[in-house]
Image: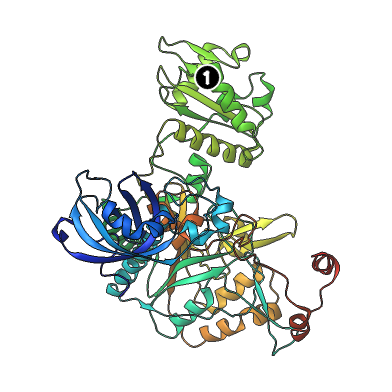
Amino acid sequence: MYRTHTCGELRIADIDKSVTLSGWVQRVRNLGGMTFIDLRDRYGITQLVFNSETEDKLSEAVRNLGREYVVQVTGKVAERSSKNSKIPTGDIEVIADGLKVLNASDLPPFTIEDETDGGEELRMKYRYLDLRRNPSRKALELRHKMALEIRNYMDKEGFMEVETPVLMKSTPEGARDFVVPSRMNPGQFYALPQSPQVFKQLLMVAGYDRYFQIVKCFRDEDLRADRQPEFTQIDCEMSFVDQEDVLNTFEGMTKHLFKSLRGVEIEGDFPRMPYSEAMKYYGSDKPDIRFDMRFVDLTSTASGKGFKVFDDAQYIGAICAQGCASYSRKDLDQLTDFVKRPQVGAQGLVYVKYNEDGSFKTSVDKFFAADDFKAWADFCGAKPGDLILILAGKEEKTLSALCELRLEMGSRLGLRNKNKFAPLWVVDFPLLEWDDETERYYAMHHPFTSPKVEDVELLDTNPAEVRANAYDLVINGVEIGGGSIRIHNDELQQKMFKILGFSEEEAENQFGFLMNAFKYGAPPHGGVAFGFDRWVSLFAGLDSIREVIAFPKNNAGRDVMNDAPSAISDAQLNELMIELKGEAAKKVKEE
């Protein structure tokens, strides 16, 4: 056999056992009369010792060993004289009496260590090597354990896992679809699912009242740290429920995951925050509530005093940074540069230092009196020693910039501890959003989201004011997932399609199969979908979901390891009856 034990298994109780280990050479240390080799596999590292007696017999093989060679070693377990408390096998070593090289290795392009010298792009190109590193292994182990815990919890709650199609009909709403040409139906295309939305609703019609699935989804959209073209969802749907039923069920799942995987007990109910409040006080529909620093609207207090920036502003907002009145000019210049970055978009920053002696030092002294600054401080709840930071301009843009400034201050003050978790539900989203360019409404979530019962009448008179029966789970400023109670009434669904600008023919063409199903007794239903990759990265304390996906794409949506996407042959294109034109044809020809 290749091995009797793994490289993470042996302990003091195994002393004097004859063992066989197989794995990869982590490092070789030649100390003259003795050679030490760290042998690694998925389970850990075991130190091997080749003394002068065994080295004579195995000298050539030992001398020629390099990093990442795959070897098989036989020997006897002994107690280490110099123990290593940092690894579980640190009390023992294996005195080797046999060595077989199973496969040699080229020199890796970066060191296979926890702290590697490889940049992200290089590591992604050689992802199979990067996955040998402990941080990568631990991330995938966490992913595996989380999937098990989710399935166990959902099973106990009466949910059934059902697989839904990967090849489906394209729909133009939401993000762009990835489309797949059909060889057997020339000129027609499947789409890869952005979510299993319509299928899980059909399962509710079919009577499978508690469904879930850990499922791959696909969206052809611009990428960032928390987005990939293909990602994994925890997709769920329930029948005969209202919003509170859904929130309570998945609040329970969230608490279970925190307790079982992180050992964290989350007490009490998660706060419910209306979307309007999240935007007013945090400038974001996914507020980080690990710390306070809520926005204060100074528009009515600070305008009309002759300071043009404020007088011309639609909105003047402030945050209070406790204990920061001691910030130097350099600190304040850095904050000003931060808010002027294109990603933030503010024109400038006004500061007010509320000094310990009760005086004020500001960047707008000549425009305002001390009484004005005291009034602002009172509005902000500031105390001597605090710093007030103010942005002004168009309301939507200023709220967004103030949100970024608040998060930056939270990071600078150490208030965004990755081991502290603050979950909440954001509720009562707008049902619709208006697009000036196309001059029509779009569903903020999807066309099947139910309006709040008390707002249904507004669909006929003021659609923009209608609130959705929708909810998002937000943890530490990250949207972990979201969902809604669905429309199950055919008349209301038709009205929704009409508001969204669908003709009867378009609605029938795209969603007729679902509407037909609703004619056969659709129950009240609702659900939620969580970003599985985001869950894992949150629990792992990582900022990018790429690190918790075995083989991710880069920021350009490319797999740099196998060079996908790539061109296909003319024969394949002809078989699919696809002719490349314009820039696409020119690019392929150049390549």
The answer to whether residue 427 is seen in the rendering is no
* Viewer-proximal residue among 506 and 464: 506
Residue 296 location in percent, x, y? 50, 32
Rendered view: 579 above or below 459: below
Q: Which residue is drawn at 37% across and 56% down?
A: 59
* Viewer-proximal residue among 539 and 354: 539
Q: In this view, does 372 lie to the left or right of 473?
A: right
The answer to whether residue 276 is seen in the rendering is yes
Count of marks placed on residues? 1
Rendered view: 161 above or below 555: below
User: Crowdedness of circle 1 by 10 Å Cα count: few (<14), some, many (20+)?
Assistant: many
Farthest residue to the front: give it.
56
Amino acid type assigned to the residue bearing label 1 in the image: Val
Q: Quadrant of residue 583?
A: bottom right
- Quadrant holding the C terminus: bottom right
Residue 578 location in percent, x, y? 78, 80
Residue 502 location in percent, x, y? 68, 72
Q: In which quarter of the image is residue 582?
A: bottom right
Rendered view: 565 above or below 359: below
Q: What element carries label 1?
A: strand
* Viewer-proximal residue among 349 and 140: 140
Q: In this view, does 140 lie to the left or right of 589?
A: left
Q: Provide the residue designation for mark 1.
A: 352
Q: Which residue is drawn at 16% across and 61% down?
A: 14
- Quadrant holding the N terminus: bottom left
Q: In this view, does 141 lie to the left or right of 76?
A: right
Farthest residue to the bottom: give it.
184
